[in-house]
């Protein structure tokens, strides 16, 4: 959910949150289509070189069948979903039917976001296919840091990717995702400059450190410095350069980890759902299972007792372990701001 005026459906979803009962289907459904990946980001839960435990080959080989994808797409569209996110446990463009999936989403008139590392896609072709938005994991502002963050890639990949992104300026909304940890935190201001040069939005999030990658974690002193010193500077620079960003939400996320702010309420049960590559339906990025698309249609799962039990648990403040590293923090932060405005009778920014 973006800033600006609220649509009637957005208002209904927020009002459903207040009533503890969804009155609409999810705004966004995130569909994982494949687990294979061509990169090895240093803090990836699935492919980081230093992981304490590697994913098994059977997991890495999983991908969604085209017939299953078509059925899921029809069901989520029927439930009132407005946006589809295509991604995976790996890189979605590894899937041999990815372009067909994109076309199918757009043929239904749905908004499409793709989460990708951007190294395998033909950007001009994606313009022709009417892709609306791409979230591209850059996690750097320089070729050297890019290569350090993606050890199996040469520095040239950074330059090629930057060129591809710049080539679709004004035609596809590109959001450069900057996953911040000890390796790249020094480049936050440069990341704003990069977004300005390439004509993109800059999106920051606190990086995970799965077992085996703990050395890349930001220590408390660094988190304090980022929140209190670097982020204000970055906000000022972004304003000067006209770069859109999520820095207030990132500051809030950092604040939670240093005891200076509380997490926003969870809106996932009203705005979002995730269908995993093997058909399981998850409440959010935390893999809280609420159903399976091979056992019931999506619309039935969305209104099921199992789904509602998770909603009510979270309303009662009973969080899950993974909530501490919420993958939907930006969504929740934005929705909380939108709800506050709705309750005061203002639907604008």
Image (cartoon, rainbow, N blue to C red):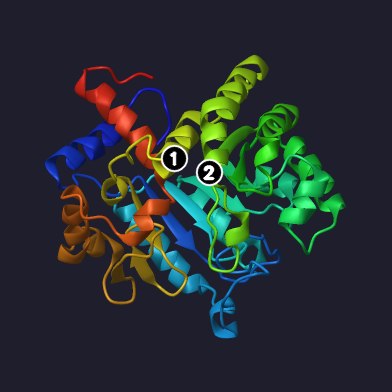
**Residue 334 locus on image (x, y percent):** 38, 33
Q: Quadrant of the N terminus?
A: top left
| Residue located 32% across and 45% down the image | 271
Considering every residue shown, the one lying at the far left of the view is 19
**Cα gap from disc 1 to disc 2, whole angstroms:** 8 Å
Left or right? Give the position of 124 relative to 203.
right
Q: Secondary structure at mark 2?
A: strand
The percent position of residue 257, horizontal first and vertical second, equals: 43, 44
> In what element is the residue under mark 1?
helix
* Number of numbered labels in the structure image: 2
Identify the disc placed on residue 281.
Answer: none
According to the picture, the residue beneath numbered tag 2 turns out to be 205
Residue 343 falls in which quadrant of the image? top left
**Residue 6's image quarter?**
top left
Q: Nearer the viewer, residue 342 or 145?
A: 145
1 and 2 marks in contact (CB < 8 Å): yes
| 198 to 128, vertically: above or below | above
State the residue position of label 1.
253
Picture coordinates of residue 173, whole percent (x, y): 60, 36
Looking at the image, which is closer to me, 210 or 47?
Answer: 210
Which residue occupies the foreground of this view, 227 or 298?
A: 227
Q: Is residue 130 visible?
A: no
Question: In the image, is 2 to the left or to the right of 225?
Answer: left
Q: Position of residue 168 (x, y in %)?
A: 71, 37
Left or right: where does residue 207 sit relative to residue 282? right
- The C terminus sits in image quarter: top left
Residue 310, by quadrant, is bottom left
Tell me if I can see residue 221 in this picture. yes
């Amino acid at each position: 959910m973006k800033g600006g005026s609220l649509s009637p459906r957005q208002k209904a979803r927020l009002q459903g949150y207040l009533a503890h009962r969804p009155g609409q289907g999810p705004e966004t459904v995130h569909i994982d289509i494949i687990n294979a990946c061509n990169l090895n980001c240093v803090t990836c839960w699935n492919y980081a070189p230093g992981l304490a435990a590697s994913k098994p080959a059977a997991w890495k080989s999983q991908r969604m069948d085209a017939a299953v994808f078509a059925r899921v797409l029809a069901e989520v569209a029927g439930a009132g979903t407005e946006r589809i996110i295509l991604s995976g446990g790996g890189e979605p463009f590894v899937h041999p039917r990815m372009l067909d999936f994109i076309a199918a989403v757009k043929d239904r008139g749905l908004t499409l976001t793709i989460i990708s590392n951007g190294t395998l896609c033909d950007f001009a072709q994606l313009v022709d296919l009417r892709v609306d938005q791409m979230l591209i994991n850059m996690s750097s502002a320089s070729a050297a840091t890019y290569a350090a963050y993606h050890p199996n890639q040469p520095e040239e990949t950074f330059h090629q990717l930057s060129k591809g992104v710049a080539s679709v300026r004004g035609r596809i909304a590109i959001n450069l995702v900057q996953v911040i940890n000890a390796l790249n935190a020094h480049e936050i201001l440069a990341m704003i400059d990069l977004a300005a040069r390439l004509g993109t939005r800059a999106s920051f999030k606190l990086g995970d450190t799965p077992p085996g990658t703990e050395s890349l974690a930001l220590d408390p002193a660094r988190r304090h410095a980022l929140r209190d010193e670097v982020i204000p500077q970055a906000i000022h620079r972004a304003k000067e350069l006209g770069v859109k960003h999520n820095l207030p939400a990132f500051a809030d996320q950092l604040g939670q980890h240093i005891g200076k702010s509380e997490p926003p309420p969870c809106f996932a049960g009203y705005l979002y759902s995730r269908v995993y590559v093997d058909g399981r339906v998850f409440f959010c990025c935390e893999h809280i299972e609420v159903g399976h698309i091979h056992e019931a249609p999506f619309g039935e799962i969305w209104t099921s007792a199992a789904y509602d039990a998770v909603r009510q648990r979270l309303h009662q403040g009973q969080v899950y372990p993974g909530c501490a590293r919420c993958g939907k923090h930006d969504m929740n932060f934005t929705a909380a701001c939108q709800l506050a405005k709705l309750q005061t009778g203002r639907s604008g920014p």
